[in-house]
Amino acid sequence: MTSVLFGSLPFPGQGGDQLVSKAVTAAIAALFKRTRKLEATVRAEPVAKLLQGSADGFDFIGQGLLMHSGLRVEVMEFYVQAVSIDFGAIFKGQVNLRRPTQATMRIVLTEEDLTDSFNTPFLMKKLQQVEHAGQPLHFQKTQMTLNADKSLRMQSSIQVGDTRDSIDIDVTAHLQVEERRRIQFVDVVYGGNSEAVELAQVLTQHLNNLLDLDEFALDGLQLRIDQLRLRNKQLTFYGVAHINHFPQRKVDAAA
């Protein structure tokens, strides 16, 4: 009976698990501007349970992901627990969850990912919300370095207000996670003269208020970090993703 039902699907030769896997992969791919590799595999045993919208879970592995905002991620992995979906919506190219679920996750950022992301209009606009002496700060040529001692170094040129002169700042700090979602610069060491140090302190305080995962997560996801690891020129987050509904691209993400 199951083979008869799945044999009548609009994709001949494919089982229900393959059909749903392809639909989930396509829906996730639409959330990104570009991907190097992306694959979602739905797990269901027996496969017939998909007809009732039940799956044992699905695994999502993405590499070389570029978001529409310009933010880059080297690796993003989600291993989703038992999930209930609207099987009928698959034929419309949609993935609808019948109830919230959660997944274990691993996210990896390289030095290049961090540097490119901090130079995107998306993040530069957020950085420019900070002011010093009543003047907006303009950041350019930001460089991020992941050090062997598990610290992060950030170098940037800052223009204060309308002045054409720039001030080079140099910040080295360790990273820690507070409340499982806020990335904080701690044990901070500043380089440069007194003016550069003062600007760098203002920037560090702003970053500690800005780097909240709830501000950057895809719609429908709530990310919580259990472990942060910095080594081999990579910053890796391990944690849990609470999935309230299948993610949709945020309208302002393209800005």
Image (spheres, rainbow, N blue to C red):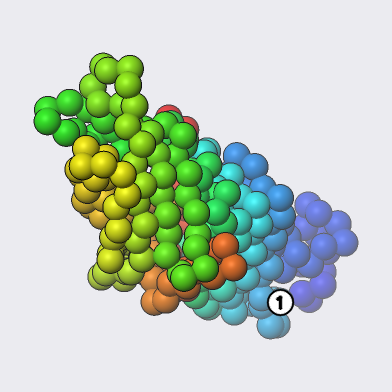
Q: Residues within 10 Å of mark 1 (few under 14, many from 20)?
A: some
For label 1, the SS is helix
Name the residue rendered at 50%, 54% in the picture: 145
Res. 211 in view: yes
Quarter of the image with the N terminus in it? bottom right
Quarter where residue 34 is shown: top right
Q: Nearer the viewer, residue 9 or 17?
A: 17
Query: Residue 104's spot in the image, x, y percent?
Result: 49, 75
Residue 119 sits above or below residue 74 on the image: above
Q: Nearer the viewer, residue 243 or 155?
A: 155
Query: Residue 116's spot in the image, x, y percent?
Result: 53, 42
- Left or right for 252, reference 114: left
Quarter of the image with the C terminus in it? top left
Residue denoted by label 1: 47
Badge 1 amino acid: Val
Q: Nearer the viewer, residue 92 or 127?
A: 127
Q: Nearer the viewer, residue 207 or 76?
A: 207
Query: Residue 56's spot in the image, x, y percent?
Result: 59, 79
How many numbered callouts? Answer: 1
Residue 68 sits above or below residue 86 on the image: above
Name the residue rendered at 57%, 57% in the picture: 110
Residue 178 sits above or below residue 82 on the image: above
Name the residue rendered at 55%, 54% in the picture: 111
Judged from this view, the residue extending furthest toward the bottom is 45
Residue 34 sits above or below residue 162 on the image: below
Name the residue rendered at 56%, 73% in the picture: 79
Judged from this view, the residue extending furthest toward the front is 193
Res. 93 in view: no
Judged from this view, the residue extending furthest toward the left is 133
- Left or right for 64, reference 141: right
Quarter where residue 173 is shown: bottom left
Query: Residue 138's spot in the image, x, y percent?
Result: 32, 29
